[in-house]
Image (cartoon, helix red, strand yellow):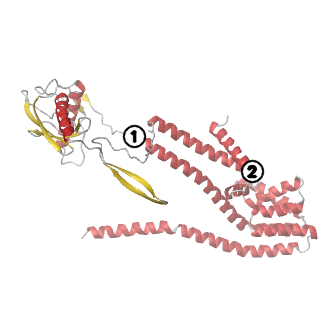
Amino acid sequence: MKNPMMNLGERIALLLEKKMEGQKKSPVVKEIVTLSAGRKSEVRKFYAKKMALCITVLFLGGILALLCALLPGMGSREVENQTLLRPEYGEGDRTEELTVKAGEEEVGPLQVTVQSRKYTDEEKQALLEEAVEELERILPGENDSLDEVRKSLVFPETLARGAVQASWTTFPYGILDEKGKPGEITEEEGVVVEIQAALTCQGEEAVYTAHARVYPPVLTEKEALIQSIQKEAARADEEGSHEMTLSLPEEAAGRSLVWYRPQQDPVSSVLAMTAVAVLCIYVQMDQQVHKKAEARRNQLLLDYPDLMWKMTMLLGAGLTMKGTFARIVQEYEKNRGRACRIRYVYEEMAYTCHEMSSGIPEAEAYERFGKRCQLPEYIRLGSVLSQNLKKGSRGLTELLEKEASDSMNQRKNQAKKIGERAGTRLLLPMMLMLGIVLAILMIPAFLSF
């Protein structure tokens, strides 16, 4: 049973193949056909595999991202009727980026600042009074009153629907934090704390003062456990402050402790890695085709002299050109079974033999052989073989001997170029190694001063 992703990839590849019929072939398609000795079915297989891999990565990445969290949507807002809506009271100023058409000329974009609405003096005073009433109502929080405070008080930053800002101070300092949460208190009779809230409404100010008696909190079982763990951790930190590591407490409140690091939300990382993986797969598969095509061209150039000598010897032994092709292919297939190595020139010759046996004229088959190899040497060889078949094979052996001799020099030059390219690739690693060696030698010398 086929992989469902592979089935989907094959369908997409088939649709792409139908859509691209009659259009110019891309370099990747041409190289795939060349690498597969003219088998166009390999193009569909390549794109089916490529699409299947990309779809699989997208599917897995999407599932993983959905398991982590849902992505929120994004909204948009328009400005109409040549009117900008001001921010409401206390929302702060807003900057709009607009384009202005002055007559026939368009100017912009321009930054326009829109201030929030302002209150009148009467409205400010009313809002401050409303803020005081709201404070008296919400300040105790979950406590019954300010006479007995065991839980957090409510210290809001804004009041009166955001129109009034509040800043808080307490005395004595440290009994309540900036959020109104009681600290560690040991006095059972409680501690009296003075609370002041400085209220501000668009420049108008007022001060609200209250007094609260703060007692040690009544902790739930979980809160008591957390407090005990925090105390044990603080004690361990203090006792081992001179050591390189902190040994976390193994027990607190009669319970054994095992510590873990919390994991961060992986949604954005998963989606980013999924997109990068799909892009890398898509690009890498094309690059692999280009590399194989380049390796094929180099191999064809290196194999050309050997082919010339083989053809020269077999023709000199009395074989026809068709028989020479068949004999070389037969020997290649025999050796390939043992060495498991593909030699592209012999694969193309095997394809040529198949064409001739299927009814294609011998002269045309030789010309097609040269064109499939896509190198000037082979195109010239295919043309020579086709012409000599029509005119007669007189002088063909001498011509092939000369071609073999010339190609040996070309082979040496090609091998030299390959070596130079390999040396260039090694330049960066060698520079990195040089930098490491210099660092090893120089860093200790600098540290010794």
Q: Mark 1 or mark 2, which is nearer the start of the sequence?
A: 2
Whole-percent x, y for residue 201 in the image? 20, 42
Q: CA distance from mark 2 to mark 1?
A: 47 Å
Residue, x 24% and y 39% (percent of image)? 163
Q: Is residue 191 above or below residue 431?
A: above
Res 230 quadrant in image: top left
Q: Quadrant of the C terminus?
A: bottom left
What type is the residue that disc 1 sits on? Asp
Q: Nearer the viewer, residue 170 or 251?
A: 170
Looking at the image, residue 29 sits to the left or right of residue 390; the answer is left
Amino acid at circle 2: Glu
Examine the rendered structure and indicate whether residue 133 appears above or below residue 429. above
Q: Tell me the residue that label 1 is attached to.
A: 265
Residue at 21% x, 44% y is 202
Q: Which mark is residue 21?
A: 2
Q: Which residue is more in the foreground, 366 or 151?
A: 151
